[in-house]
Image (tube, grey):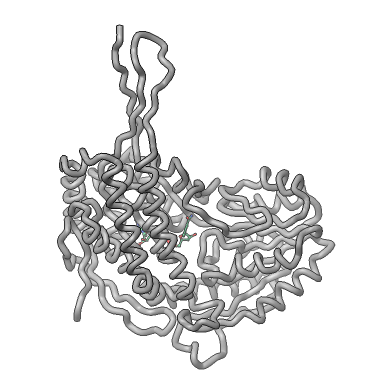
C-alpha cells in the first residue's frame, strides 16, 4: 500500500496513526492512502514550526521580501492550477469548473497578502507627553490552521497567506476527506523558496491530529473553519489556554425576494445560491423567503428551474450539480429530508438520489425544495450543508426580519428588491456578517468575512485580515 506522506520541517513523513483512505465521492473509487499524524507527529510539527519561525532568516526577513515569496506561491498555484483543480474534484466531488475558479482565487489570496506586506504600515499615536508612541505588529509565532472539506483550495490559501504574510509559521491540518491539497501547498512553498518549517502540513483526523494541535502549548493562535460544534470544542480549549482564535463556522443564510424585485435576476441567484457546490457552502442561501403576494408564482418558477438542473459527474461540462463530498455526508442530508417529512413538510422537487444508473456509484443527491414548514422546523433551523432549499412566505418587513434572524446563525443574507431604501433598512436589520443586495455569493479577498452569533468569531480577509495573525505592540520612545 503506497501512502502519501505529510510535511514537517521540509521532510516528508508517513506518520504514526492509521492512514487515511481517500475516496472519490463521485465514483466511489479509491484515490489512495495518505499518512495520518499522531499526537507525537503533531508535537514534532509544532516544534519544527517554532524553530523555523525563530530563525533570523525568517523573523528578520523584511516584509517586502516575504511578499516576493508569496507572489511566487501565487504564480506556482496558477501554473499548477489544472492539476490542483482536478485533485480537489477527485476528493470532494465539486464541479471541475468551480474547482478551477477556486484555484485562481487561492492564487489571488497570496497576491493580495503579498500586496499587504508591501503596503501595510505601523502607527504613530498622537503623543500625550515627551515621548513618541508607536504601535508595531508582531507575529504570534506558531499558528494552527484547521480547515474543512468543502473548499480546501481557497480556505487553506486564505489562512496560510495571511498568517505567513504576518510573519508566523503555520501548522495546517486539512480535513481527512480532502487531505492532499494542503500537501500540494506545502510542496509549492518549498518550490517557491520558503524556509523549511514555515508551512507544515499534518494530515490526519480531527479528534486526533486536530485536537493535539489546538492543545499544543506552543501554538499561540488558532484559525479554524468548520462546523459550529467543532468550533465550540476548539473555543473551549483556546479559552482555557488563553489563546486567540478566529472561527469561521456554519450558516443558515436567508435569501429574501420582495415582490418589487427583478424576479428574473433573483431566480438565477436563488437557484445558484443554494445549489452551486451541491449546497455544501457555508453561505448557501438555504432559506428562501418570498413575499406573500408573489409566493406561488415565484416558487413555481424556482421549482421549475430546479427540476431542469443537470445532475452529473463533476468533470462533465454539461453538469450543473455534482455529487456530495462523501457517502456519509449524503446520509446526513437524507436524515434531514426525512425529518422534514416527519414534521409535515412537502417536497416540491428532489428529495431522493437520482435514478440515472451512471450516477449510482457516486454520492449524488437531487436538488431538493421543501415547503409548508414553519421557521421553527428542524430543517429551517439547522445547517444541512447539502442541496436542500427550505421555502417560507413572509408578510411585511417586521415578520421577515423576525423570521430571518430567528436562527442561531448569522453568516450571509441575500436581498432582492428595486427599492434601495428598503434594501438598506433590511440589510442593516439582519444579523449577518455579509449582506448581498441584488447579487449573491459575491466574494472577494479584499473584504472582511465572518459571522455573527454562532457563525463565528473574528473576520478573515480584507485589508486588516493580516492583523488577525498579529499582536499589537506599543513602543514608547522617550524624548524628554
Ligand atoms: P468539521 O467541523 O467537522 O471539521 C472541520 C475541521 O476540523 C476538519 O479538519 C476536522 O478534521 C477538524 N476537526 C474535527 N474535530 C476536531 C477536534 N475535536 N479538534 C480539532 N479539529 C477537529 O466541519 P466539516 O469538515 O464537516 O465542514 C463543514 C462545516 O464547515 C460546515 O458547518 C460549514 O458551514 C463550515 N464552513 C464554514 C465556512 C465559513 O467560512 N464560515 C466555510 C466553509 C465551511 P477531520 O475532518 O479530518 O476529522
The quarter of the rendered structure image containing the C terminus is top left
Q: Which residue is drawn at 44% across and 47% down?
A: 460
Residue located at (42% from left, 79% from top): 25
Give the tally of numbered discs: 0
**Residue 161 versus residue 156: which sits nearer the camera?**
161
Quadrant housing residue 10: bottom left
Q: In this view, does 294 lie to the left or right of 437?
A: right
Rendering quarter of residue 41? bottom left
Front residue (pair 399, 130): 130
Q: Residue placed farthest to the right in the image?
A: 293
Q: Is residue 38 visible?
A: no
Left or right of 452 on screen, residue 131: left
Question: Does residue 158 sit above or below 17 in this rendering?
Answer: above
Task: Report the front residue among 19 and 201.
Answer: 201
Residue 344, x across and y down, in percent: 70, 71
Quadrant of the picture in which ligand 1 is shown? bottom left
Q: Is residue 144 visible?
A: yes
Where, by quadrant of the figure, is residue 142 drawn? top left
In this view, which residue lies farthest toward the bottom? 357
**Residue 352 in the image: x percent, y percent?**
58, 81
Q: Position of residue 101 (x, y in %)?
A: 47, 67
Task: Find residue 63 and report its horizontal and vertical position in percent.
Answer: 29, 41
At horizontal 26% and vertical 45% (from top left) the residue drawn is: 65
Position of residue 335 relative to residue 147, above or below, is below
For the N terminus, the quadrant is: bottom left
The residue located at (76%, 51%) in the rendering is: 399
Amino acid at each position: 500500500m503506497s501512502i502519501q506522506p505529510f510535511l514537517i520541517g521540509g521532510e516528508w513523513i508517513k506518520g504514526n496513526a492509521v492512514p487515511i483512505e481517500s475516496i472519490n465521492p463521485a465514483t466511489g473509487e479509491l484515490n489512495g492512502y495518505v499518512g495520518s499524524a499522531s499526537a507525537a507527529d503533531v508535537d514534532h510539527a509544532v516544534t519544527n514550526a517554532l524553530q523555523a519561525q525563530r530563525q533570523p532568516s525568517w523573523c528578520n526577513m523584511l516584509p517586502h521580501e516575504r511578499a516576493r515569496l508569496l507572489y511566487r506561491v501565487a504564480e506556482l498555484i496558477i501554473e499548477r492550477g489544472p492539476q490542483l483543480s482536478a485533485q480537489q474534484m477527485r476528493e470532494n466531488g465539486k464541479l471541475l469548473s468551480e474547482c478551477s475558479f477556486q484555484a485562481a482565487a487561492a492564487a489571488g489570496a497570496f497576491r493580495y497578502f503579498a500586496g499587504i506586506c508591501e503596503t501595510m504600515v505601523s502607527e504613530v499615536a498622537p503623543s500625550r507627553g515627551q515621548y513618541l508612541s508607536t504601535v508595531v505588529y508582531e507575529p504570534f509565532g506558531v499558528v494552527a490552521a484547521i480547515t474543512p472539506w468543502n473548499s480546501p483550495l481557497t480556505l487553506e490559501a486564505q489562512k496560510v497567506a495571511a498568517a505567513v504574510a504576518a510573519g508566523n509559521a503555520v501548522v495546517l491540518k486539512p480535513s481527512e476527506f480532502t487531505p492532499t491539497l494542503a500537501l500540494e501547498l506545502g510542496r509549492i512553498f518549498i518550490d517557491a523558496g520558503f524556509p523549511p518549517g514555515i508551512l507544515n502540513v499534518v494530515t490526519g483526523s480531527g479528534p486526533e491530529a486536530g485536537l493535539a494541535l489546538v492543545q499544543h502549548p506552543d501554538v499561540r493562535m488558532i484559525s479554524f473553519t468548520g462546523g459550529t460544534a467543532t468550533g465550540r470544542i476548539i473555543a473551549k480549549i483556546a479559552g482555557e489556554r488563553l489563546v486567540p482564535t478566529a472561527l469561521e463556522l456554519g450558516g443558515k443564510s436567508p435569501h429574501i425576494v420582495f415582490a418589487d424585485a427583478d424576479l428574473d435576476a433573483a431566480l438565477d441567484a436563488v437557484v445558484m445560491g443554494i445549489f452551486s457546490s451541491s449546497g455544501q457552502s457555508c453561505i448557501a442561501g438555504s432559506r428562501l423567503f418570498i413575499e406573500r403576494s408573489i409566493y406561488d408564482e415565484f416558487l413555481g418558477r424556482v421549482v421549475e428551474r430546479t427540476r431542469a438542473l443537470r445532475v452529473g459527474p463533476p468533470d462533465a461540462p454539461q453538469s450543473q450539480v455534482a455529487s456530495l463530498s462523501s457517502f456519509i455526508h449524503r446520509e446526513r442530508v437524507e436524515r434531514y429530508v426525512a425529518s422534514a417529512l416527519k414534521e409535515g413538510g412537502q417536497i416540491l422537487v428532489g428529495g431522493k438520489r437520482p435514478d440515472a444508473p451512471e450516477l449510482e456509484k457516486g454520492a449524488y443527491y437531487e436538488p431538493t425544495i421543501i415547503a409548508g414548514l414553519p421557521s421553527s422546523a428542524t430543517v429551517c433551523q439547522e445547517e444541512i450543508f447539502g442541496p436542500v432549499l427550505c421555502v417560507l412566505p413572509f408578510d411585511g418587513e417586521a415578520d421577515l426580519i423576525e423570521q430571518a434572524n430567528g436562527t442561531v446563525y448569522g453568516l450571509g443574507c441575500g436581498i432582492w428588491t428595486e427599492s434601495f431604501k428598503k434594501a438598506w433598512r433590511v440589510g442593516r436589520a439582519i444579523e449577518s456578517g455579509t449582506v448581498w443586495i441584488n447579487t449573491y455569493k459575491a466574494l472577494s479577498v479584499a473584504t472582511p468575512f465572518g459571522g455573527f452569533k454562532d457563525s463565528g468569531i473574528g473576520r478573515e480577509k480584507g485589508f486588516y485580515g493580516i492583523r488577525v495573525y498579529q499582536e499589537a505592540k506599543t513602543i514608547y520612545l522617550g524624548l524628554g
